[in-house]
Image (cartoon, rainbow, N blue to C red):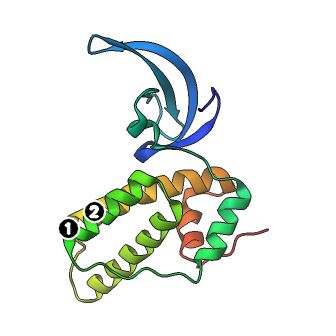
Amino acid sequence: MYRIDDTVIYGTAGVCKIEALEEREFSGEKRNYYVLKPLFQEGAKTYVPIDNEKLVSKIHHILSVNEAKQLVHTLSAEEMNWVVKDNERKQLYAAALEKGDRREIIALVRAVLKHKSEQMEKGKKLHICDEHFLMQALKILYDEFSFVLHISREEVLPVLMGERELSV
């Protein structure tokens, strides 16, 4: 169970503060909700029913500074192969975002960016679903890593791509 003032990641909303636990009525039904306030979306709030396991499973504790640094360090040597079949790739994207596994999301982002570069060299563009995933994934990663590591959003991608070292 999460507590008020916990900083978490929630789906594609990114880094959120749990602002309250409260009973609300939506669509004529009273339920208890986590009230999440995204830190990088002014005025937005998200209500997650506490009794909805599927939605609550999308809430993840934010990485610690050490976890983020360790993740970046261990990922520097890893690479993910491009999944050629569109439907398999879409399912992989959806599953990674659903689970919130940062290691998998970063590996997929690296694969998409590598493929994008290859496509640009051929004078082609990235498929729209790949572009959509990339935007969602980068938002999540930019929010969390800039927040946790106290770096600008512009510094996150070079760090995740292994192009810039983190100061210890």
Farthest residue to the bottom: give it: 122
Q: Is residue 12 above or below residue 68?
A: above
Q: Is residue 82 above or below residue 19?
A: below
Q: Is residue 151 above or below residue 2?
A: below
Query: Residue at position x 34%, y 62% from top?
Result: 93
Q: Where the C terminus falls, by quadrant?
A: bottom right
Q: Which residue is mark 1?
A: 87
Question: Badge 1: few (under 14), some or many (20 or more) residues near its Cα, within 10 Å?
Answer: few
Query: Residue at position x 46%, y 28% from top?
Result: 43
Q: Please indicate whether residue 27 sits to the left or right of residue 18 in the image.
A: left
x, y percent for residue 127: 21, 70
SS assignment at label 1: helix
Q: Which residue is mark 2?
A: 91
Q: Please indicate whether residue 22 sits to the left or right of residue 147 in the image.
A: left
Of residues 151 and 2, the one nearer the viewer is 2
Marks 2 and 1: in contact by CB < 8 Å?
yes
x, y percent for residue 56: 46, 36
